[in-house]
Image: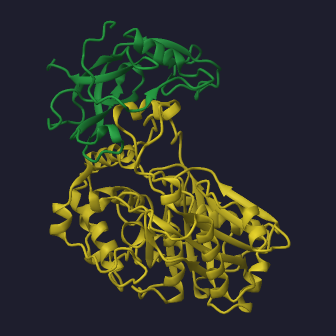
Amino acid sequence: MARPRTERTLRGRVAVIGIGETDYYRHGASPDAEFKLALKAILAACADAGIDPREIDGFASYSDDRSEASRLAAALGIDRLRSATMQWGGGGGGCCAAVANGAAAIVAGLADCVVVFRALAQGQYGRFGQTAGLDTVSGERAYLMPYGVLAPPQRFAMRVQRYMHEHGVRQDAQRAIALASYHHAQSNPRAVMHGKPLDEAKYEASRWIVEPFHLYDCCMENDGAAALVLVSEERTRDFRQKPVYLLGAATGSGPRTAAMAHNSPRYASASFDTVAPDLYRMAGLGPSDVGVVQAYENFTGGVVMALAEHGFFKPEEANDFLTLENLIAPSGRLPLNTSGGNLAECYMHGFELVLEAVRQVRGTSTSQVTRNDVAMVIAGPMVTPVSNLLLGSEAAL
Amino acid sequence: MSSGTYPSYLPPGLPIPVAEPDGLSAPYWIGLRQNKLLVQRCAHCQTWQFGPEWLCHRCHAFDPAWVEVEPHGRIFSWERVWHPSHTSLKQHGPYVAVLVELPQAGGVRMVGNLLGHPMQVVTIGAKVEGVFEHHPEADPPFSLLQWQSRRST
């Protein structure tokens, strides 16, 4: 589709030319420092692309990543740092937005080669799932923590419970999402849960973390790093890999999503009610064009909401749509989280999902889908800001 | 000990709520210590707002007024927590947190615990009433607002 160059869009203007990650570890098990993990992933992504790391002139990340752009530039001996963007907001809601911010820097002429990455070593810096070292709390936490609403599972369970109540969604819908992630992880040697299959009986027998989340509805916590390299579309033919183009990106949230202490007007929501239409508008595509989805699973219930908000089914259809056979590669109705994702590959704060979408478009996934010209990534359900991406092949442009 | 006679629902050791250094929520926390539930309501456009903010989200008037609200409402959502995410909850067993909607205050919501048996059946929409839970010996002292089922009306 020819579009005038004056149009404000990322569609077709930027491509992923390289991806890389470290080994993925259980939380606290990395032998490497967090910053070293970041460097390893960045060098792996550059090697994949066949680009000299000294050509990097920008970095983009999210969730207050501790591996700062300027330190990376110094460590890598980069001559010119031209872009350093950080997406506001905790959680994984920024894993797609970071790609969009890096791409926007390229389109705007602020940088030519941007690395987008995330690195986590929880043994060195503490886990998200435990609250420690806080004597007093103020702000939003003061309205929650004294009541034992401390960590992400407890902060999000009430949202999902309300959604299940409003739309008649059953536990089975959440279970299907967990089963699909574990199914795909069994083909993926990178996956932390490779060789550890999950079936319905094991899911049902697993302990409650917080109702309505069983153990297997909750993401892992892991150590590792993942990175990708972006350049403008004019340069894509200079590199080794088949380019994977950005077709669209969006970020944000709807009215007063951050209203404190669970006062968001659209409470039973994954925060995509305004963001999903933005994505489709930029890409000029709709849900039926999407062949494969990587959807951030902090908790499976958030995936149910996020997929519905992206138009793949109505909330009332969730129980029928969300079955294992519909969600698996190569040719389920909507193959989901084909690397194992946050539940079973690695909790790289969602960045492993972006890399997997690139692999699907390249045709190199360990659970390759047949319809792979358009791949979606959904980041951070239920937080704000959330974000999303559509990636595609040259044929999809 | 002040008027607080209800025992603490959760074991001691969880983080203590305090107002921010800028004092935004101080009236709320002081109110709870005096058995009063205070919620912001804009004096100009009558919009209710919780948690507090420095201005009204509807008309942008600064410093919304604090008004006392009857502590009763309806369960908007709930969860039963099993996994201890804090050392003080280890060995404690399940507990219930509820999100309560206050129709008499513009539908603002607040989180608390549902007093009573942790395995009780919890129903969205059920009526609940507030119970002030005081911690005068804590350093600093603080009070919470808990909830219990209301006898059928």
In the visual, does A294 lie left or right of A36?
left
- Residue toward you, A297 or A333: A297
In the visual, does B73 lie left or right of B149?
right
Residue occupying the point 21% across, 65% down? A203
- Residue toward you, A391 or A59: A59
Q: Position of residue A45 (x, y in %)?
A: 63, 81
Q: Position of residue A373 (x, y in %)?
A: 52, 84
Residue occupying the point 40% across, 73% down? A345
Q: Quadrant of residue A108?
A: bottom right
Specify whether residue A322 is in view: no
Colour that chain B carries in the picture: green
A297 up-or-down from B93: above or below: below
A27 up-or-down from A368: above or below: above
Image quadrant containing the N terminus of chain A: bottom right
- Residue toward you, B105 or A139: A139
Q: Quadrant of residue A83?
A: bottom right
Residue extending furthest front?
A: A31
Specify whether residue A80 is in view: yes
Residue occupying the point 44% across, 51% down? A382
Residue occupying the point 61% across, 61% down? A97
Counting every numbered tag in the picture gives: 0
Q: Which chain is represented by yellow in the image?
A: A
Q: Position of residue A337 (x, y in %)?
A: 40, 73
Q: Quadrant of residue A176?
A: bottom left
Image quadrant containing the C terminus of chain A: bottom right
In the visual, does A21 lie left or right of B16?
right
